Amino acid sequence: MRLGLPRWLPLRRARRVAIVAVAIGAGYVMLTFFQVLQASGEDNRSPADAIVVLGAAQYDGEPSPVLASRLDHAYALWDAGVADMVVTTGSNQPGDRFTEGYASYEYLLVEGIPDAELLVVTDGASSYEQLAATARQLRERDMSSVVLVSDPYHALRLRQIADQVGLDAVVSSTDGGSSIRQLLRETAAVSLGRILGYRRVDNWLGRVG
């Protein structure tokens, strides 16, 4: 007579598989968090073809404090001779008269960067879209190496997106720290972006940077 397996055995195995899967997932997210934290505040000022400023909020043509901080940092890099060209990025929100890219362009023009050394890229509301559009514009000018300027928590994701869109990139972060909320949100974006692709994740989450 053939003995069957106890009915509870498949359930026990399923529970074990679920526990292992949860443990692996938690470990992956925890590792990503520490990688985001380690990269936070990266400040690489290697010479490049261009300095790229990631967009942030602007108010009727006036950069927000976050965006102004990024622009001031980009100006300092340009003034130090890191690159001859500065790229400003970012589209506009519904109802806005100005794009983030154009508000940034005007700001740096007033600061003293010549018009010929500024490039405005207004395609894209998310980090992925901004960098993909920038890559297309720079390829037309036979440029590929860039220094990306954004907030400290943003560094790891920016480097990985840049790699996906074909930019040879390093990151020079603005001064200041990162909140736990920013780090956790960034951890979620990187964790999903590595698996699903940053283009898809950015469309789901909107602009995280």
Image (spheres, rainbow, N blue to C red):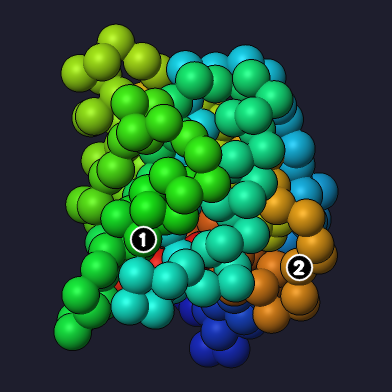
SS at circle 2: loop
Camera-side residue: 58 or 150?
58
* Above or below, 178 relative to 10: above
CA–CA distance between discs 2 and 1?
25 Å
Q: Position of residue 97 (x, y in %)?
A: 20, 75
Q: Residue at x 33, y 26 (%)?
A: 116
Q: Give coordinates of residue 119: x percent, y percent.
A: 32, 35
Indicate which disc, 2 or 1, sits on the residue closer to the N terminus: 1
Disc 1 crowd rating (10 Å Cα; few below 14, some 14-19, many 20+) is many
Q: Residue shown at 19%/81% (left/top)?
A: 94
Task: Determine if residue 184 is in view.
Answer: yes
Query: Residue extending furthest bottom?
Result: 8
The reply to whether residue 35 is visible in this rendering is: no
Count of numbered marks: 2
Q: Residue at x 69, y 80 (%)?
A: 181
User: Do residues under tags 2 and 1 come within 8 Å of each other at their CB atoms?
Assistant: no
Q: Is residue 75 above or below residue 180?
A: above
Name the residue tied to disc 2. Answer: 178
**Nearer the observer, 36 or 141:** 141
Q: Amino acid at mark 1?
A: Ala
Q: Amino acid at mark 2?
A: Ser
Of marks 2 and 1, the one in the foreground: 1
Is 165 drawn above or below residue 33 in the view shown?
above
Q: Is residue 51 left or right of residue 101?
A: right
Which residue position is annotated with label 1? Answer: 103
Which class describes the residues within 10 Å of circle 2: few (<14), some (14-19), or many (20+)?
some
Q: Residue at x 70, y 52 (%)?
A: 174
**Occupied quadrant, residue 182:** bottom right
- Element type at mark 1: helix
The picture places residue 16, in percent across and down from the top left corner, at 66, 73
